[in-house]
Amino acid sequence: MIRTRAVRWRRGVVFALPGLWVLGVVVWELLSPRGQAVQLLAAAPAIACAGTGRRQCVAAAGACAILALVPLGSAGRADAGMRVGTCCAILAVAAAGCAVTVRRRRLLRELERAREVAATAQSVVLRPLPPRLDGITVAGGHLSVSEGALVGGDLYEALATPYGVRIVMGDVRGHGLTAISTVAAVLGSFREAAHDEPDLADVLRRLDRALQRHLCERARAEGRAGPGGEAERWLGEDFVTLLLLEVCSDGVVTALNCGHPWPYRLACPAGDGDGVSARAAAVGRGDPLPPLGLFPLPPELPVARLTRLLPGDALVLHTDGAEDARDAAGAFFPLARVLGDAAGGAPIVPSRVIDRVQAALLRHTGGRLTDDIALLVLSNDRRRAAEHGPRPCLVRSGRPRR
């Protein structure tokens, strides 16, 4: 209510400013011994144009300025030549102001349409996650360096497949349209391969092949192909860090990591959790594979068994922008501590964790982000399945098909 009143008050001041300007010029002209301020009346339509951007207000300000010449003329403060010149200046400024407002409104309509198209396209690339997948509650969030952008260099997706809930979290080198095209290529391949390939390793191989094709096509389009027509793609210029996860029906989480930060596990406090924050601990063992796009994948892919999500526990995936965010003093963002505080006690609500962590990130950085930040929270709500003894999930070897 207070904010609404303040907005209305500021809006009223903006509308009244041209009239106050005319009144001030008239008073100054009448009280000044020499009376040389009458030409300032021509600024009233320009003030209305800058303040409101409406043709009606510009026309009203011009009419008010012309009418103000009447008392000045009757009082002998301005001769006929000065009044005619001022009147012509007022009409010229009012006409120019009306033309500017028409063009401004047309540009605003085009901008609104462009924003709608961009928002639709971005939602197709990085589409909203379903709130629940096969007993797993899901929530995702994204903070972009580019103002107004929903998609940057970060990507994430979660799908319910016959082999379990499969998740991808990645970070494309760079920003802008180039990074968005790479994000679209990787996500499009994942959405098909996650349902088609029974082995998580084969999903990663499909993503790698899709990325190779995309980079080769882009290199040819940009004229960066080699003498034989092959694109020079192994130069380390374009790559994607990637984390592939599979959550089985018994809560076992397996993963393949290509140069991406390992996730955090939020353990649900014992009891009702009142006044006790969840514990955040990093999960992940061994060195990850190189990012996709730098080197070919090895023949054997190490599918790692990360952890087991008990009912009520959660897993937090993130890009490196979350841990690398700094404040004005150069201190890094304490992600693990903030995750525990954001989760609070039981039950852990993924959407609430996302909102609290994003707010803490913006406070820590003062709203000045230096990298895109993506967060994805998965909470295990399979209580009934756990009580009836879930089917175990086998870790596959990751050998390529022959």
Image (cartoon, rainbow, N blue to C red):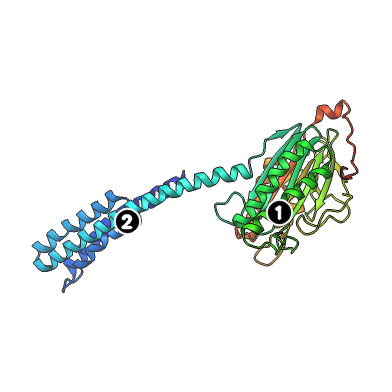
Residue 287 screen position, x and y as percent: 87, 56
Nearer to me, 257 or 216: 216
At 73% across and 43% down in the image, what residue appears? 190
Residue 171's tag is 1
Other-residue count near label 2 (Cα within 10 Å), few / some / many at <14 / 14–19 / ≥20: some
Nearer to me, 382 or 217: 217
**Height in image: 246 above or below 220?**
above
Which amino acid is tagged 2? Val
List the residue tagged with mark 2: 100
The answer to which image quadrant residue 160 occupies is top right
Q: Is residue 346 visible?
A: no
Question: How many numbered discs?
Answer: 2
Other-residue count near label 1 (Cα within 10 Å), few / some / many at <14 / 14–19 / ≥20: many
At 71% across and 54% down in the image, what residue appears? 171
Q: Is residue 241 visible?
A: yes
The answer to which image quadrant residue 305 occupies is top right
The C terminus lies in quadrant:
top right
Classify residue 27 as left or right of residue 1.
left
As helix, strand or loop, the secondary structure at mark 1 comes to strand
At 16% across and 61% down in the image, what residue appears? 87
Q: CA distance from mark 1 to mark 2?
A: 43 Å
Which amino acid is tagged 1? Asp
The answer to which image quadrant residue 195 occupies is top right
Classify residue 35 as left or right of residue 396.
left
**Quick one: label 1 or label 2, which is nearer the N terminus?**
2
